[in-house]
Image: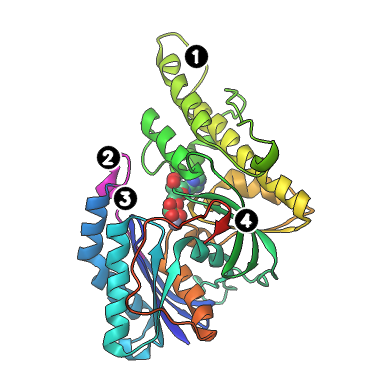
C-alpha cells in the first residue's frame, strides 16, 4: 500500500510517499524558516499563505522523487491536529481534495502520534550499496515515549501506535519553545534549537548554574517546566552584556549551560517514569529529538534501549504522516472527508490524544 502523506501544521510544507507503513520512497520538506527568521518565530498568517503557495508543488515533487504518478497512490493522509489552524487547513484540504478526486481512502492523523511513529520508518539508501537507516527492529509495545517539539514536551506510556497515556507534560512552556526564546533574546538565530545545540559544542556547560524546576512531588512526578529556566537565562542577559562583567564567559557558555539544564529537566522526568513503570525502551520523536546532548545522555544509559528517528525525520515531515496512515488504513480505518483541523488536542495533559 503506497500512501501520500502531507504535513503543514507549522512552518514546514511537507509531503512524502511511504510504502507499507515503513519504507520511505520520497520525503520533501520545504522550510519556511527564511520567511519567519526576521520575526524570531513563526508568524501564523505568513505560514498559511506560504503553504497555500507551495503545497501543490511540494506534493508534485514528492511524487516525482518517488517516481510515481497520482494513479499509483493507494491512500492519502494529512496532519489534522495539533498545530496552527490556518496552516493545518491547507494541507488537510489539499489531501482531502486529492483523495476525493481519485476516490482514495483518506485518513486524518495526529501530528504528535506521527512524530512518535517516525522512528519506525526506513529511509531509502542515500549512498548506493549502503544499508538504509535505521536497520533496527522496531520496538515492541509497550514502551515509553518522549515527544519533544516546539509546542509539546510529553513523557508517555505507549501501548500501540495510536494508544498513548500521558504520564508527564510541561506545566508551562515546551522545551523547543525555550530553546527558541533563549536564542531570540540572545540574538543567536532562529530557530533556536539547532543553533544552540551547535554553539553548545564549543561551550562550557558548567559556566552558569541554571536552575532545574522543583516538580518532583505528587502528581507532578514526571512533569517538566521551562518558564523558570527560560526566565533565568534571559535575566542573565543584562549581566552578561554589562561592560567588564563575565569577561571570561562566552555566548557558547550560555548555550551549553542552558542546554544542559533543559536536557537534564527532561531526563529527570523520563528516568523516573522508566524506573516506576519498569519500561526499558524509550522512543523519542519531535524536533528536539535531534538534540545531540539528549541523544548522547540517553546513549550513556546501557540499561535502557533508546530509539531516535533518523535526524531528517525528527522535525516536521510528511513521511511520519504517511507512515502512521499506512497502519491505520491497513487496519481498515478511514476518516470522513468532513473531518476538520483543530489547533489543540483536548485533554492531552493526562490522556492523549
Ligand atoms: O517537531 P518540530 O519540527 O515542530 C513542532 O511540531 O513544533 O519541532 C521544532 C522544535 C523547535 O522548537 C526547534 O528549536 C527544536 O524543535 N529543535 C531543537 C533541535 N532541532 C530542532 N531543539 C534542540 N536541539 C536541536 N538540535
Ligand atoms: Zn512537529
Give the mark nearest the N terminus, 1 or 2.
2
Which residue is at 48% across, 68% downward? 320
Q: Is residue 70 left or right of residue 267?
A: left
Give the mark nearest the N terminus, 4 or 1.
4
Residue tagged 2? 39
Residue tagged 1? 246
Residue 170 quadrant: top right
50 is higher (above) or lower (below) than 132 = above
Asked if the residue at tag 2 contacts the one at tag 1, i.e. Cβ–Cβ closer than 8 Å, the answer is: no
Residue 290 appears in the picture as rendered: yes
Residue tagged 3? 33
Which residue is at 20% across, 58% downward? 49
Residue tagged 4? 156
Within 10 Å of disc 1 (Cα), the crowding (few <14, some 14-19, many 20+) is few
Q: Which of labels 3 and 1 is toward the front?
A: 3
- Looking at the rendered structure, the secondary structure element under dot 4 is strand
**Mark 4 to mark 1: distance in Å?**
40 Å
Within 10 Å of disc 3 (Cα), the crowding (few <14, some 14-19, many 20+) is some
Foreground residue among 88 and 341 = 341
Amino acid at each position: 500500500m503506497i500512501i501520500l502523506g502531507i504535513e503543514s501544521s507549522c512552518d514546514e510544507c511537507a509531503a512524502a510517499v511511504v510504502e507499507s507503513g515503513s519504507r520511505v520512497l520520497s520525503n520533501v520538506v520545504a522550510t519556511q524558516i527564511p520567511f519567519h527568521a526576521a520575526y524570531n518565530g513563526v508568524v501564523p498568517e505568513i505560514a498559511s499563505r506560504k503553504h497555500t503557495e507551495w503545497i501543490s508543488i511540494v506534493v508534485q515533487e514528492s511524487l516525482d522523487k518517488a517516481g510515481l504518478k497520482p494513479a499509483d497512490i493507494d491512500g492519502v493522509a494529512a496532519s489534522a491536529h495539533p498545530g496552527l489552524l490556518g496552516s493545518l487547513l491547507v494541507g488537510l484540504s489539499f489531501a482531502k481534495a486529492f483523495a476525493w478526486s481519485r476516490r482514495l481512502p483518506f485518513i486524518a492523523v495526529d501530528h504528535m502520534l506521527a512524530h512518535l511513529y517516525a522512528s519506525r520508518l526506513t529511509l531509502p539508501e542515500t549512498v548506493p550499496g549502503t544499508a538504509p537507516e535505521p536497520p533496527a527492529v522496531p520496538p515492541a509495545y509497550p514502551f515509553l515515549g518522549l515527544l519533544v517539539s516546539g509546542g509539546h514536551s510529553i513523557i508517555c506510556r505507549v501501548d500501540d501506535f495510536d494508544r498513548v497515556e500521558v504520564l508527564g507534560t510541561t506545566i508551562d512552556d515546551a522545551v523547543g519553545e525555550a530553546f527558541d526564546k533563549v536564542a531570540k533574546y540572545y540574538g543567536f538565530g532562529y530557530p533556536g534549537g539547532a543553533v544552540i545545540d551547535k554553539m553548545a559544542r564549543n561551550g562550557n556547560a558548567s559556566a552558569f548554574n541554571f536552575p532545574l524546576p522543583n516538580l518532583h512531588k505528587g502528581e507532578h512526578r514526571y512533569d517538566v517546566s521551562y518558564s523558570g529556566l527560560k526566565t533565568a537565562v534571559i535575566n542573565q542577559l543584562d549581566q552578561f552584556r554589562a561592560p567588564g562583567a563575565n569577561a571570561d564567559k562566552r555566548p557558547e557558555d550560555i548555550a551549553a549551560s542552558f542546554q544542559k539544564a533543559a536536557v537534564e529537566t527532561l531526563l529527570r522526568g523520563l528516568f523516573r517514569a522508566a524506573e516506576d513503570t519498569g519500561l526499558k525502551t524509550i522512543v523519542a520523536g519531535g524536533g528536539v529529538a535531534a538534540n545531540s546532548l539528549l541523544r548522547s545522555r540517553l546513549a550513556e544509559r546501557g540499561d535502557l534501549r533508546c530509539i531516535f528517528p533518523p535526524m531528517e525525520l525528527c522535525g516536521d515531515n510528511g513521511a511520519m504522516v504517511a507512515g502512521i496512515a499506512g497502519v491505520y488504513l491497513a487496519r481498515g480505518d478511514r476518516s470522513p472527508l468532513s473531518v476538520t483541523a483543530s489547533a489543540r488536542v483536548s485533554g492531552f495533559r493526562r490522556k492523549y490524544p
